[in-house]
Structures are given as structure tokens and as C-alpha cells.
Amino acid sequence: MSSVTESSAILHQLRKETSPFHDAVEQNSFNLALTAGTVTAADTARFLAKMYGFLQPYEHQLQAHAAAFGPEWQLDQRYRAPLILEDLPHFGYAGIPPRCPVLLPLATRAQLLGAMYVLEGSTLGGQVIARQLDKAGITAHAFFTGRAERTGPLWKAFCQLLSEAAAEDPATVVASAILTFQTLSAWLNQP
Ligand code: HEM
């Protein structure tokens, strides 16, 4: 059963309002290939490069606004773009992947919280993907394995903090989460 904080009003609203966008992002070609059991190393490298292009500018913004978050947010443990740079050379991908040219508006803490909800939540799917990749014999996945056994505790801690912090402007948090999902889907689907 979910704890009180994981079923707070704002989390319930975020889940409900972003659920169609979660379904849509799951339909990207990499995840479809994973589910079909046809995924290749090249598909994985392309997806990782795309995720880098999206995560890097977001994490850069988060870092720039880190003073708005106390140590309890454990931001230093949440940055994941560098893990992708560890993975890519294993796929023969050299250099730094291109960044998504559409920058999310992340000027306020409420906007950052909406984007954080999406990208912190994506660590849950990452655990599923890591297992699917293992089955496909693709083992270079520092990014998807990510926080490993710390995934659940870090997500729970985030949910608890978000539930309190979102009260300052819940409408902006939800709008930012939706925009983050939409922008990510468009970027992933762009050739
Ligand atoms: C990069 C794209 C993705 C993003 C941004 C994303 C985002 C999220 C978010 C925000 C949540 C939290 C929902 C909540 O409030 O509980 C979540 C949960 C989850 N996602 Fe994704 N997700 C992505 C892709 C995937 C994929 C491809 C899968 C399947 C392989 C997946 C499986 C899950 C699972 C299993 C949960 C946990 C659901 C639960 O415990 O109730 N996600 N994801």
C-alpha cells in the first residue's frame, strides 16, 4: 500500500493528468523494440544519446537553481546525464550528443518541480528497461541501472518533499510536468 505522502493530493493529480503522456512516451521506437524483443545496440545508443540531449540542459538548470533546494533534496545524487556519457563509448558513440533545442521554462521552483517529477519518475521505468536490456544481451547500461537499490528510497523521499513544496503553486507544477512530457516525446520521436 502506498504511504500517505506517495498518495498526496498533488501526486494523485500529477499521475492523473500526466498518465496519457506517460503512455505516449512509452510508445517511442526504442521501447517498442524492447518490448518486441528486437532491440539492438544501435537502438540503445540512439535512445541514450536522445536522453542525454534532454537531461543535460534540464540538469544544468536544476544545478543553477540548486540554492532553492535544501540538502534534504539530495540533488547531488540525482544528476544522471554523466552516466550516459559513461555508456555511450561502449556502443562506439564518440563525442557529446546534440542537445534538445527546445528549452523548458525552468525559472521558478514550481516549474522545476514539475520537470523533476517527470525525470525522477523516469528512474522507475529505467529499472524495468535495464532488465529488458540484460535479456537482450546489452549490458552497458549505467544510465538505466542508475540508482539501483537506491531508486525506491530516492523516489519516496522526492515524493514526500514534492508533496510539501508543490503547495506553493500546484497548477504551475502540473503544467510544467505536462510540458516536460510533451517536449520529451517530441524530441524522442524526432529523427
Ligand atoms: C523516458 C520516458 C519515461 C518517463 C519520462 C517516465 C516517467 C515516469 C513518471 C513521472 C513516473 C511516476 C508516476 C507516479 O507518480 O507514480 C513513472 C512511473 C513508472 N514508469 Fe515511467 N517513464 C518513462 C518511461 C517508462 C517506460 C519505457 C516504462 C516501461 C518500461 C516505464 C515504466 C514505469 C513504471 C513501472 C513506473 C512505476 C509505476 C508505479 O510504481 O506505479 N516508464 N514514469
Image (cartoon, helix red, strand yellow):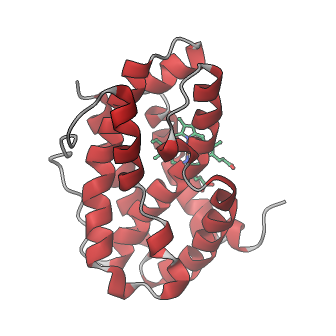
Q: Using the image as rendered, state which of residue 122 and residue 111 is in the foreground.
A: 122
Q: Is residue 102 above or below residue 68?
A: above
| Furthest residue in direction left, as rendered | 101
Q: Residue at x 42, y 63 (%)?
A: 79
Q: Residue at x 56, y 61 (%)?
A: 13
Q: Is residue 13 above or below residue 85?
A: below
Q: Using the image as rendered, state which of residue 169 and residue 138 is in the foreground.
A: 138
Q: Residue at x 42, y 27 (%)?
A: 44
Q: Is residue 12 left or right of residue 52?
A: right
Q: Quadrant of residue 183?
A: top left
Residue 30, percent from left and from top: 44, 24
Q: Quadrant of ligand 1?
A: top right
Residue 117, percent from left and from top: 49, 61
Q: Is residue 62 above or below residue 41?
A: below
Q: Quadrant of the N terminus?
A: bottom right
Q: Using the image as rendered, state which of residue 178 and residue 189 is in the foreground.
A: 189
Q: Residue at x 61, y 63 (%)?
A: 155
Residue 29 in view, yes or no: no
